[in-house]
Amino acid sequence: MQTLDSQTFKTRDATSYDAVTEQFDFFTEHLTSPLAARMISLAEIKQTDSVLDVGTGTGIVALQAVNKIGETGKIHGIDFSEGMLTAARAKAEKRALGQKVEFSQMDAEELKFEAEKFDVVVSLFALLHFPNPLMALKEIYRVMRKGGRVVIAVGSSPPLLSVTGLTHRLKIFPNVLRRSRGKQLVAPKFLDSLVERHFPEAHESEESHLARHSHNRTQGVAALVQSAGFKVLQTDWQGHQAQLETPEEFWEIQRTFSSISRKRLSNAAPEKVESLRQEFFRQCRTVLSRGGNLVYPFAAFYVVARKPG
Ligand SMILES: C[S@@+](CC[C@H](N)C(=O)[O-])C[C@H]1O[C@@H](n2cnc3c(N)ncnc32)[C@H](O)[C@@H]1O
């Protein structure tokens, strides 16, 4: 497999969203809102704060955070993908929030802001997309005022050795039984495994090093935040499971949210994608005919930290 230089990786990652921005926004608005709300609550945003949302996507966190700021507060969302930003700007305009929120195209690893500009920085589900996450965290550190608060969240299971981890494992145990009886398909593993089988040759790395090499990312991410100079104050975890009504929705959610499926399917020959789709729908119908279900578990692990000083 080819390892891309980091600039090419960033460009390909960002542009891979352009074709699925609408679907991304649809699923994000329906599913991610409670995770964004938790992030905003952990960020303790004050009325006068200047807030930066890194890897804002279609603006789910930025546009919710607006409710926390007053006349003098300001939210700035940045993202590398123009497609995502166009959707975020359209929503801000529709909600008449243009005065309070601004969206700019920018690389998280090279922020075009002066030092100590922001009181609060938030970033939901973006860190694992950066080829050099430590560089992005150091940039976040640089643009934050001393004493400022940062909340970084990545998709992850809860910490293994924690009450939350134990409770979570007990809660999902019935799912393990359903799966072993062929009565549940789980996103994005299901589509990813079909993609791996139909298109075994990845032309290039589709995920960052951090995403590929840390399945339970809780310790690694907290350690990275600390390495950037922050003092870690607390961690938190929130998880949900969506049940998809139709195989069509189940297909869309996976080819939108999974970096592997999104990138590999968009590079594949249409007739080969069609044959994979047929198999996907056949298996979904079999599981549904047994009274089974199609699920998408999603969760965020939050690291809350402060810039000392
Ligand atoms: C999974 S999405 C999360 C978006 C949003 N925070 C949310 O939770 O809906 C990851 C986002 O990171 C953006 N991204 C990837 N690499 C980036 C980079 N180097 N700089 C800024 N944004 C980047 C992608 O374009 C994408 O919008």
Image (spheres, rainbow, N blue to C red):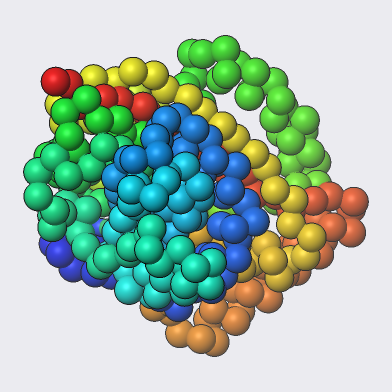
Residue 219 location, x and y as percent?
Answer: 34, 24
Lateral position of residue 36 relative to residue 201, left or right: right
Q: Is residue 301 left or right of residue 140?
A: right
Q: Please state if 105 lies on the left or on the right of 251 as rendered.
A: left
Ligand 1 falls in which quarter? bottom left
**Residue in the foreground of this view, choosing between 245 and 119:** 119
Depth check: give the residue in front, 292 or 89: 89
Looking at the image, is 174 positioned above or below residue 258? above
Count of marks placed on residues: 0
Please tell me which residue is depicted at 50% across the width and 59% down the height of the picture. 257
Asked which quadrant contains residue 212, the reply is top left
244, above or below 132, in the image: below
Q: Residue at x 32, y 73 (%)?
A: 82
Q: Is residue 271 visible?
A: yes
Q: Is residue 79 left or right of residue 86?
A: left
Camera-nearest residue between 300 and 156: 300
In the rendered view of the protein, which quadrant contains the C terminus? Answer: top left
Residue 52 image offset from top left, x and y in percent: 30, 48
Residue shown at 51% from the left, 28% from the top: 237
Residue drawn at 63 percent across, 74 percent down: 277
Residue 263 visible: no
Establish if 268 lies above or below 230.
below
Q: State which quarter of the image contains the N terminus.
A: bottom left
Task: Estimate the x, y position of residue 119 in percent, counting from the top left.
Answer: 26, 37
Residue at the extreme front of the image, as rendered? 71
Provide residue 93's location: percent of width, then percent of height: 47, 72
- The residue lying furthest to the left in this view is 115
